[in-house]
Image: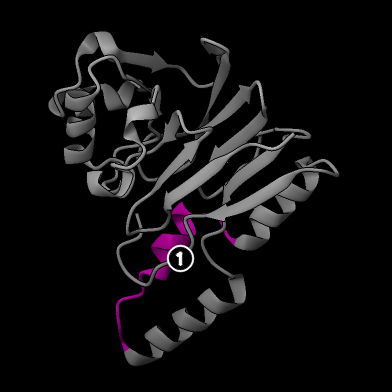
């Protein structure tokens, strides 16, 4: 099977992925960047509150322009959504580990380890199965065998980040990279997890790759 996807943004400058034209995962980009597509949206899934994943003005505009649009998220995102003028009746609160249905879509959120409450999503669609996980230091305990599409964080290369750490320590500079390693997944960990889960015909895409400053 082939799943249609459109990566509007990835990394600290803003994260947003559109699946099959109608499902949005994260809204950390400007409304202008999604304006050509937003009229087809049916469901917006949010992972956590960091601004590169949750742009309040974009969410507010989506809620205003599309009064029937549904927003799915963990309980920790509800106050943020209400502050962005999303009506309570349009918010679906998900608990990690449970299975939810939206029309012909099965949604399985799962908990991720980050500096704030965060979760990833498994989506079972008529066109196939996709898993999305970003802003996490580990995927231990998460299983998604033989999915059609893997959209997984590969934030940094181990050797490269160690070189940056040494250079900054020698120069007496602030070393952001320690924070990145605590809150993000390395390419090596990503590759290992994908190798353990993917099937022979699976496709995988790296998301939230490292930017020098501001990654959250």
Tell me if mark 1 has few (under 14), some (14-19) or many (20+) residues whose alpha carbon lies within 10 angstroms of its own: many
Q: Is residue 111 above or below residue 102?
A: below
Q: Secondary structure at mark 1?
A: loop
The residue that appears at 56% across and 21% down in the rendered structure is 108
Residue 55 as seen in the image, left or right of residue 168: left
The residue that appears at 47% across and 33% down in the rendered structure is 21
Q: Which picture quadrant has residue 201?
A: top right
Residue 85, image x, y percentages: 14, 23
Residue 47 as seen in the image, left or right of residue 121: left
Query: Can residue 135 be seen in the rendering of this structure?
Result: no
The residue that appears at 61% across and 42% down in the rendered structure is 139
- The region drawn magenta spans 172-186
Q: Would you name the residue on which mark 1 appears?
A: 210
Residue 22, image x, y percentages: 45, 28
Query: Can residue 110 be seen in the rendering of this structure?
Result: yes
Residue 4, image x, y percentages: 59, 39
Pick whichever, 159 or 126, lies toward us: 126
Is residue 62 on the magenta stretch?
no
Which residue in the rendered view is the most extreme toward the bottom?
171
Residue 172, image x, y percentages: 31, 87
Pick whichever, 184 or 106, lies toward us: 106
């Amino acid at each position: 099977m082939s799943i249609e996807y459109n990566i509007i943004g990835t990394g600290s400058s803003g994260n947003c992925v559109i699946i099959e034209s109608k499902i949005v995962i994260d809204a950390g980009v400007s409304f202008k960047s999604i304006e050509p597509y937003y009229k087809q949206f049916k469901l917006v899934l949010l992972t956590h509150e960091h601004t590169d994943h949750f742009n309040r003005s974009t969410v507010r505009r989506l809620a205003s322009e599309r009064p029937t649009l549904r927003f799915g998220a963990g309980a920790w995102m509800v106050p943020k959504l209400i502050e962005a003028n999303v009506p309570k009746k349009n918010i679906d609160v998900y608990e990690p580990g449970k299975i939810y249905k939206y029309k012909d879509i099965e949604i399985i959120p799962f908990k991720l380890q980050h500096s704030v409450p965060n979760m990833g999503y498994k989506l079972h669609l008529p066109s196939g199965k996709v898993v999305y996980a970003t802003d996490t230091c580990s995927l231990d305990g998460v299983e998604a065998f033989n999915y059609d599409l893997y959209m997984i964080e590969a934030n940094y290369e181990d050797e490269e980040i160690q070189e940056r750490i040494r250079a900054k320590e020698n120069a007496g500079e602030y070393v952001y990279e320690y924070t990145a390693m605590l809150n993000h997944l390395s390419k090596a960990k990503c590759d290992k997890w994908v190798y353990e889960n993917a099937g022979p015909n699976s496709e995988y895409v790296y998301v939230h790759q490292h930017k020098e400053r501001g990654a959250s």
